[in-house]
Amino acid sequence: MLTSFEQVLNKAREVKVPGKVAVADAASAETLKALAKAEDIVFPILIGDKEKILPLIEKAELSRYEMIDEKEPSKIAALSVSLVRDKEAELLMKGKLSTGSLMKAVLDKENGIRTGKLLSHIAVVESPAYHKLMLFTDGGLNIRPTLDEKISILKNAVSYARCLGIETPKVCGLAVVETVNPKMEETMDAALISRMAERGQLGNVIFDGPLAMDIALSKRAAEIKGVKSPVAGDVDIFLAHDIVVINACVKALIYLSNVKTGGVILGAKSPIVLLSRSDSADTKLNSIALAAIMKTDKRR
């Protein structure tokens, strides 16, 4: 089981031939710095305004790349997605382009890279205060998922957890209480998903919820509160009721704690490296590695 980003990066670097990544609007200094650090993991195809990208390439010391000169955002998005759709690139990465522009091209019914699955975002966090990697979903794509959508988001996350070597992921349905309250939809949904997991409807996964964050993170907190949970203090995946919970949680960890993080979108024909444009080069590098390990076995 991979328990740190160092291990994730090492696994991503096991490839014999770096796969190509289509970078949508590569005029981003931090994105190019990350790509320079990832030259033994991916080979970038840079799509965007050549005049803006070239000076940044020199500063980033990126030595190997292809470039497609394009200034119009919608065309940048379409070109980037078409490279993945036509199998000229294995991965898709958001550069300076807005998330909305990129996802519009990804989800295009005729020219996109949909698979029929719900797309969802997963953020992976490494904290010195926790003993393994934590997977948070969905803080980047689905605003307020229905029960069925939560189940799809969960399945995406469980599938990805296995890329990290987590064969039986422990999942927490986040709430602010551990009791079911009809006035709190998140507690109702978590209880239903928990029952489905007990009956084997979700495969090889251990799910418990509703659970407050302190119970999820601390077995001691569970003991003090008298809560018996098979996942307390050992959660792999945190599943939330809406986008605000996970987005706020992960960003608070990034800015207030000494954590490492990365993020990818799951459910498309290719993993999509999608982060905030303000994220650091190291966070972008981690995200590239997270996406690359999904393709490792196919490139050997």
Image: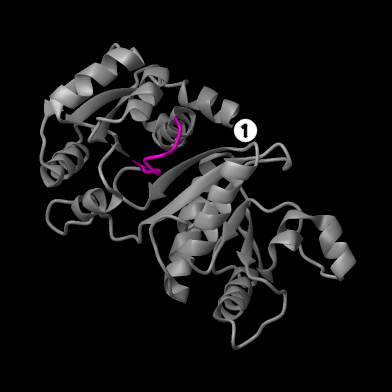
Please name the residue shown 15% across and 30% down the image: 49
- Quadrant in the picture for the N terminus: top right
Give the left or right position of residue 110, taking residue 140 as reference: left
Look at label 1 and name its amino acid.
Ser
Residue 126 occupies quadrant: top right
The image position of residue 275, as x and y in percent, is: 40, 43
Q: What residue did someone put label 1 on?
A: 4
Could you tell me if residue 211 is visible in this image?
yes
Q: Give the range drawn in magenta.
A: 272-280
Please name the residue shown 65% across and 41% down the image: 257
Tell me, yes or no, whether the highlighted magenta stretch contains residue 78: no
Query: Magenta stretch mostly in which secondary structure?
Result: loop
Give the left or right position of residue 115, taking residue 120 as reference: left
Could you tell me if residue 62 is visible in this image?
no
Give the left or right position of residue 39, taking residue 102 as reference: right
- Display colour scheme: one colour
Q: Is mark 1 on a helix, strand or loop?
A: loop
Please name the residue shown 73% across and 40% down the image: 131
The image position of residue 58, as x and y in percent, is: 28, 13
In the image, 4 versus 230, the foreground residue is 4
The image position of residue 172, as x and y in percent, is: 64, 62
Residue 228 occupies quadrant: bottom right
Above or below, 78 relative to 174: above
Q: Callout 1 environment at 10 Å: few (<14), some (14 to 19), or many (20+)?
A: some
